[in-house]
Amino acid sequence: MTDTLENRYNASMHHGKFSDRVYLTELGSAFSLSDLSKTEAMALKADYSKIIAKVKNKHTGIFSDNGYTCEAFFPLKSGNRVSFMVKYLKAERMAVKNGVIISDVLKEAEKTGIRYHSTDMHMRKLTEHDADALAELYRLVFETYPFPIYESGYLRETMAGNMRYYGVFSGEKLIAAASAETDSERTYAEMSDFATLEEYRRLGLAAALNEELEKSLSVDGVKCYYTIARSVSYGMNKTFAGCGYTFTGTLFNNTNIGGGMESMNVWYKHE
């Protein structure tokens, strides 16, 4: 069970009961108050409990004037800023669980960072021929996920679009992977879908993958990177702290991942 991805009301969005929300991932230049009103009407009709939107400066006022608050952000090198604007449609969605753990994860991330160290494994960019192995890796690592990454057809489709995937192999076996998705203008990229088989964890493979993705993106002119990491994951938050990313906020009760609804931390980095 995953959410629906579509273009609607001058925005790219995904929505559904899986994460019980509407997530506007990119707004078109013509996005207006009317489009926001239609989005809210859709969310209320579907009985969703949260709306979240990734918003540049141009559209921030539309959201803040209509009861949305900024839970996290990342600045662009141009001086623009991308804000995660949020509105809760049900009071119970606002109740934060694991608050003590979330706070402790951030403290530990600030004190230490996982640094990549060399191994005898090899890394490369993944192609459509790796889609079946990648889907299997994601099935083994993630109990639930907000996108249909268990489906090789979906992975091939995203590879043909704005997403690139890198993987680490032990021999011929895919043991870790991650992705990066650029916005339509290649202004920034989201570092995502980090997965490592349990027996290969604590080797710094996530940091190595992130570093390789950054190099690839930099060649294409992308200089701003961000990630949305599980707020209770010591490993991933330490990874991004160690890779030089800055924490800017927590998206509470945001995503159905790893078997349940979780809050997510936003980190960013400029080259």
Image (cartoon, grey):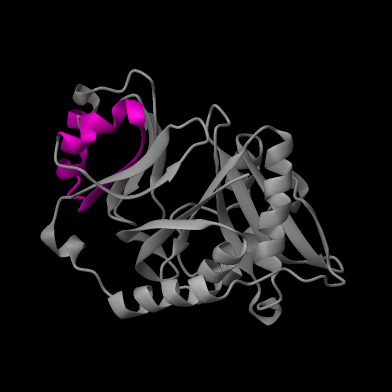
Residue furthest left in the image:
91
Residue drawn at the location 14% of the way across and 36% of the way down: 66
Question: Percent from the top left, x then y, of residue 184?
Answer: 53, 29
> Foreground residue, 25 or 128?
25
Residue 265's quadrant in the figure?
bottom left
> Is 201 included in the stretch rendered in magenta?
no
Question: Percent from the top left, x then y, of residue 176?
Answer: 69, 65
Question: Percent from the top left, x then y, of residue 28?
Answer: 39, 24
Looking at the image, can residue 98 be seen?
no
Residue furthest top in the image:
30
> Is 45 included in the stretch rendered in magenta?
yes
Residue 135's quadrant in the figure?
bottom right
Q: Is residue 209 left or right of residue 48?
A: right
Looking at the image, can residue 221 be seen?
yes
Residue drawn at the location 38% of the way across and 49% of the way down: 3
Please provide the residue range marked out in magenta.
37-65
Q: How many marks?
A: 0
Q: Is residue 204 left or right of residue 64?
A: right
Q: Dividing the image into 4 quarters, which one contains the C terminus? A: top right
Residue 230's quadrant in the figure?
bottom left
Q: Is residue 94 left or right of residue 6?
A: left
Question: Percent from the top left, x then y, of residue 5?
Answer: 42, 40
> Foreground residue, 225 or 170?
225
Vertical placement of residue 166 versus 141, above or below: above
Vertical placement of residue 270 versus 240, above or below: above
Residue drawn at the location 13% of the way across and 56% of the way down: 90
> Foreground residue, 128 or 228?
228
Q: Dividing the image into 4 quarters, which one contains the N terminus? A: bottom left
